[in-house]
Image (spheres, rainbow, N blue to C red):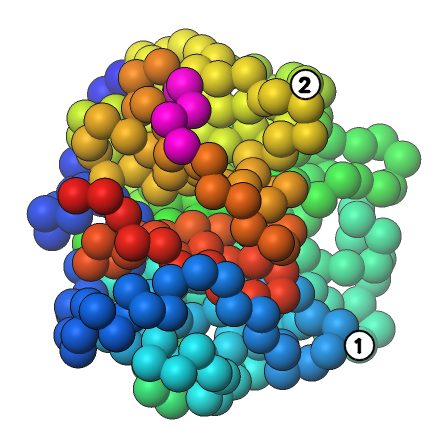
Amino acid sequence: MLKLAALIVSALLATGCTADAGDDSTPMGGSEDDLTLRAGYKSLRTARDQAVYTGIAVDGQSAYLASNDRTIDVVSLKTLKRTKTFSRIAAEALSFDGGKLVACGMRDDSPAGWPAPPSGGMANNYVVSFLDPSSGAVGKEIVLKLETYLGTSSSDGFVDLPNMSCKVSGGTITIGFAQEKLQHEIVSFEAPRADKSVFDFREIPGATRTKVGKARRDRTITGFAISAQNGLTLAAGGYGIDRVVGATTKELRKAEPREHFVDLWDGGGATLLAVDNDGALLTLDAKTGKTLETTEIPDWLEGVTVRDGFAFVAGRKGIFIKKLAR
């Protein structure tokens, strides 16, 4: 198991990246002082009023915010205003890799008249899309079919959908999977060269699979981070933060009351960044999980990334920017 985890780390660091997938894109440029002046929280109006943001990626002078209504809003970091919106993209998590914006998310691909599959009439697929960050055009799509696997978790025709998270770096796609009755795991594979690929989730060619403990009702995976120095660290929702050590999943930090960890950022240093659903960006000791700093944010938080010395946090209704200590 340690070998599999090492393979994932090696793949993610193939381009010298030691952090989140946004790190191999071009520098933001412009004046750091200008961005520092806008540090803090900014509420935004999503393209559709009922939508909420679920993930974030940053490249150049733009932040890209994934929404739960299959849209991606592009926000200027100079003005903190929405400049464009990409539509009809399954986007729950975002990364930048090789100059492409990569969106990952669940999508119902059942055609009209499709016989009801195990989950009650849907054909749930997890889709990874590589987009042109200027136009939003999809240049490559990987579809991972989930229905057959999810059907093995139930005998009554109804299944719980999994928690899935995704990061892409150096051409490697890494996905977290957690479902109450199925094996929790981190799955890593090279992005296919073809423009369109369709695989069963359990039969992805060349994939390495790191089992994360056992499928237990008191743990989950809502997000993850990987670095060569700290290995694989998991956000476990309301159950704290876990770390995978060899074949063992250990609790790095217990959740305090009201904490619900949904995403992590690990640059391979002495600290981690963690976002708590209930409005806090935490700086943690990477070895012990101890809180070193807490930043309160007036939003329900969903994702975090780091670019050029700044942390960028996606709230459901806005964006938070913080200059990090050097």
Depicted 95 relative to depicted 154: above or below = below
Residue 263 place in picture, x, y as percent:
48, 42
Magenta residue check for 291? yes
Residue 65 place in picture, x, y as percent:
49, 68
Instruction: Give the residues drawn in magenta, as a range.
Output: 289-293
Indicate left or right for 84 with 131 as reference. right
Q: Can I make out residue 138 in this image?
A: no
Q: Can I make out residue 245 in this image?
A: yes
Residue at x 50%, y 32% (from the top left corner): 235
Q: Quadrant of the C terminus?
A: top left
Amino acid, disc 2:
Asp
Quick one: 90 or 51, which is closer to the camera?
Answer: 51
Residue at x 56%, y 83% (from the top left corner): 87
| Residue sitting farthest toward the left | 16
Image quadrant in which you'd find residue 277: top right
Disc 2 from disc 1: Cα separation: 38 Å
Element assignment for label 1: loop
Residue of label 2: 218
Element assignment for label 2: loop
Depicted 41 relative to depicted 174: above or below = below
Residue at x 55%, y 16% (from the top left corner): 254
Residue of label 1: 112
Amino acid, disc 1:
Ala
Residue 174 place in picture, x, y as percent:
37, 45
Indicate left or right for 219 with 82 as reference. right
Q: Quadrant of the N terminus?
A: top left
Indicate left or right for 214 with 114 as reference. left
Quick one: 148 or 65, which is closer to the camera?
Answer: 65
